[in-house]
Amino acid sequence: MGSTLSVSCRFTPDRDRFTCNYNSTGDRVIRLTAFTFCADLPAVAEQVRIALAAEYGAHFTTGASGASFTIESDQDFTITWTHNALRDYLGGTGAGESSTARVVSLTSPAVIVTSTAIQQATPSTVYVTKTLERRGSVFLAKAYQFKFTVRALASEMPTLRGVLGEALKGIPLTVRQTTDSGAWSWANPDGQFTGILKSGNYSESWQAAPVQLLADIPLEVDLIE
Amino acid sequence: MAGYLQGRFVKSGVCSATFSSYAGSWTNTAVAFSDGASFASTDEILSTLAAALSGWSFAVDKESGKIVASSPGTQLKIAFSTSGDGDDLRDFLGEAGDVSPTATPYTFTSAHEAGFYPERTATQFRRTSTAQLRAARLLGDKTGETQFGPESDTGQTQIELEILTSTTAENAALETFFDEVYAAQGEPFSYTHTDELAHSVICADSPNVLEWRRLSPKLNSYWQVSLSLWSI
């Protein structure tokens, strides 16, 4: 059972729309709700479905499983990518997509499902303190960090590098440790969490790989709420 | 006895708490707390109360973190004054209001603030270094002299503490302990090990990072948290 690492998506002005032509009725601009933050691909799929429903009613469904992203309709349709950033996130190619059997299937480079679960997931609670004269040390801020090790096959490394490359730009990364989609908490210690990758901790060196074909890459994120 | 952590308490404003016991008639004893009165731990507050109240005893139930008060006679009641700032003491001890006449012994309504009582004993509690706080210089005759004699200071002692928790609920409880320490009374706090000696300590590192490490990858594993402390 593997783990899922997803680069989050926010519908900034360079990635908040595409054009859809449903059943040859003409191009219509599909607008995603501006600046909505989606922690992972299923959240993006739901926002795309909502935007399509706003224009076409209930003729479309969307789905996301792992890195797979689908748009399905009851008639043929075509998509024209208006914003390349959105196309690249979803895994589109060229200028647009034509539905095959009324389905557009894409593979997002923003997601990797590793064949082995992440190792040594270690949460940390961080207290930034200040010492006062009478009351001793009190805290100014409290934050959470998460250390974990991604174990990847050599064949998974190119995709992993792509995902981490985006995360290293400061885009939040969502980690689903197992199949548990609930948020991490002490009541749900194997839940998923979203954070900013600490770039100083990323290394391409493959550390302590127990088998030559596996790479252990230690990572650390600052959790965001 | 597994070791435990308790926060300190510094009284803000004066107050008094009146403890009454019933044995045919009510016997009332008021215990006054001055502004700035400082207690290193809940245990120290309770021993202060026990010393001031004849025949009373207090203890913390290590399962629930609640204080158990026992008085002479058959009943007790407690009234916290609010003419100063009585609420902070009352709240710290785990009560939301005065205690109406009730049978003795009496268990307080809630766990006292800033208490952590793990199921398992800490796996490590050891002194790692001791530093004397005196400036020293070497004299011409190759002897030394110090600014202060050894009797005038106690130096600093660094302690490594490895807390073992059994469940994630205990992890949450330890986090709540630090939340309550930092949000309310601040450091230092108190650690009592199996020798039942209370050590007043502060965290050596800033920021203070509690890193929760599973002892094995299994879901029901024990967890370990390392704390680097200064004993003061």
Image (cartoon, coloured by chain):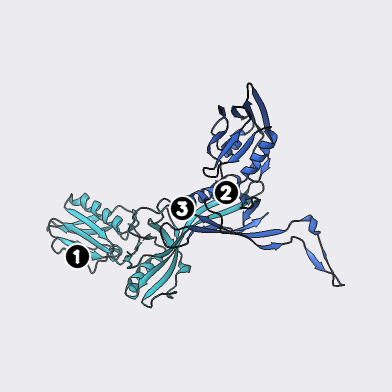
Q: Which chain is cyan?
A: A
Viewer-side residue, A91 vs B179: B179
Q: Is disc 1 in the same subunit as disc 2?
A: no
Q: Label 3 is found on which chain of the structure?
A: B
Q: Which residue is mark 2?
A: B182
B86 relative to A21 in the view: left or right: right
How crowded pointer 3 is (Cα within 10 Å; few <14, some 14-19, many 20+) is rated as: some
Q: State how far apart marks 3 and 1 are (Cα).
A: 50 Å
Between tags 1 and 2, which lies in front?
2
B69 relative to A170 in the view: left or right: right
Q: Give the answer, above or below, for where A39 lies relative to B48.
A: below
Which amino acid does the dot numbered 2 rest on?
Tyr
How crowded pointer 1 is (Cα within 10 Å; few <14, some 14-19, many 20+) is rated as: some
Q: Which residue is mark 1?
A: A97
Q: State how far apart marks 1 and 2 are (Cα).
A: 56 Å
Where residue B227 sits, quadrant-wise, is bottom right
* Picture residue at 23% right of the left edge, 55% below the top: A30
Q: Label 1 is found on which chain of the structure?
A: A
Instruction: Name the spot of residue B181 as percent of width and height, x first.
Output: 57, 47
Are dots 1 and 2 in contact, CB under 8 Å? no
Find residue B167 and name its label.
3
In terms of secondary structure, where does tag 2 sit? helix
Shade representing chain B: blue
Viewer-side residue, B154 vs A14: B154
